[in-house]
Amino acid sequence: MGSSTLEDISSADSLNLLDPFSGTPQQSVVYGTTKTVTLASAPSSLQAFNFYQFVNGYYVYTYQFTLNPSSGAANYYTFGSAPHPPYYYFARYPLSIYLKSSAGTVFSATDSINITSTTGAYQEFPQITTYKDPAFTQPTTSFRSTSTMYVKVQMLSANQLPQSVNMGTVMIVDYSGDTQLWRAPINGYQSNMPICPVSGSCSSGTSAITPNVAGAYYTFAVNLSRVNQNPWIPGTQYYSFGLTSIQDTDENYGSVNVQIQVTAPLYKMDVVVGNPGSSSNAWGTSRHTVSRPLRFVATRPAARSRPMCHDTSGWDRPTWATSSPTPSPSRSAVRGPKPAGICGSCAGWPKLSGSYPAVLGSTPKRRHTRRPRSRLRTSDSPPTRISSGRTYQGPASSRPAASTKSAARRVGPLIGCSTG
């Protein structure tokens, strides 16, 4: 046995070889008349393995035991040729291994070995064979976690009626000791998901076991997608699959095991979908995030009662991007009559030199205000629509002529105004 994490086996070191012909409960294989498993017993022992070597990052442990000694009484005989017990037959024997290091790392496995005569003969029952098709023509030990595994249990003979069969717990166990499946058929032969018949419904009350008298075997299926105890290990992993016992009218066997390989997905995701349009919560709160595309809409607000600069004829000319360090004057600083031929000067704006026009009579007091937050757009306004992002967007139809009285009361920056 090799492991990359089992640095020692000081906490537990046991191997248990089970006698399939001992019935239920199953007994351990121990040479001699006393069948108790001890530190010195063989082949089942509480101190079996020895450290062999460390190679390529793995700690390797070995265990050896004698089958039939070269001299003295034999331990294994051909079926029916010696009393059982205390002797054993050449057959397939299930075994279990349990190792534990001082750091708490555990290695647990169940499997089967064939103990044969010098000619290779042995009892081929009880024996489990797994298939990937319900016709039992394609034997395999590799499955996906969403597949259905078809199982054949070979016996010395088979009964005609399934209710005369009593099958024990069906188990799937990984090497870390977790149990993916540990479930028995109802009443020993009826369906109990994921233990199902080879064909037909897997409903309660139906027989999961199908006898084959001519072939001397029983069949059933295991739906691996419905195995819901410990989760599958992500990726490809070996598991121990078997029965704790199986019994009919003339045979009674204990544990029967075989190795299988199951490939599970590396990632799993639970998806919950709700439709708020067709249902409502009776209680609680919920949060919904709606993503909408950006939309650009041209708007035209209602006309103001006070005519502004764009309402005059000076607004007919294109608007250009301008900026000025001069702060906007206050309302109280702009007063006075409007001279003929002047629009921008009448509003109280200074000349380029910084001086105010003489027509105002005196230089108005400047009140420092906050600098405008952003500049006007640089694109020209269409002739029929105002689309500036920061200026007033008035109607583009009729523009009333500005009177001298209303122009003298205009407030705010007048951009692009001229006589015309």
Image (cartoon, rainbow, N blue to C red):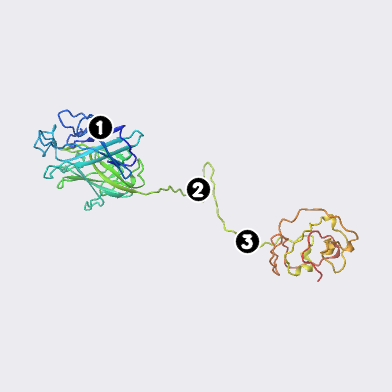
Is there CB contact under 8 Å for labels 3 and 2?
Answer: no
User: Hey, what amino acid is under mark 2?
Assistant: Ser
Question: Left or right of 120: which side holds 386?
Answer: right
**Residue drawn at (71%, 58%) of the image:** 374
Position of residue 221 measured from the top left corner of the image (x, y, whole percent): 26, 46
Farthest residue to the bottom: give it: 420
Q: Disc 3 versus disc 2: distance between alpha carbons?
A: 34 Å
In the figure, residue 413 lies in which quadrant? bottom right
- Between disc 3 and disc 2, whose residue precedes? 2
Q: Quadrant of the C terminus?
A: bottom right
In the figure, residue 36 lies in which quadrant? top left
- Between disc 3 and disc 1, whose residue precedes? 1
Q: Disc 3 versus disc 1: distance between alpha carbons?
A: 82 Å
In the figure, residue 113 lies in which quadrant? top left
Q: Which residue is mark 3?
A: 296
Q: Is residue 185 above or below residue 325?
A: above
Q: Which residue is mark 2?
A: 279
Q: Residues within 10 Å of mark 1 (few under 14, many from 20)?
A: many
Q: Which residue is mark 1?
A: 47
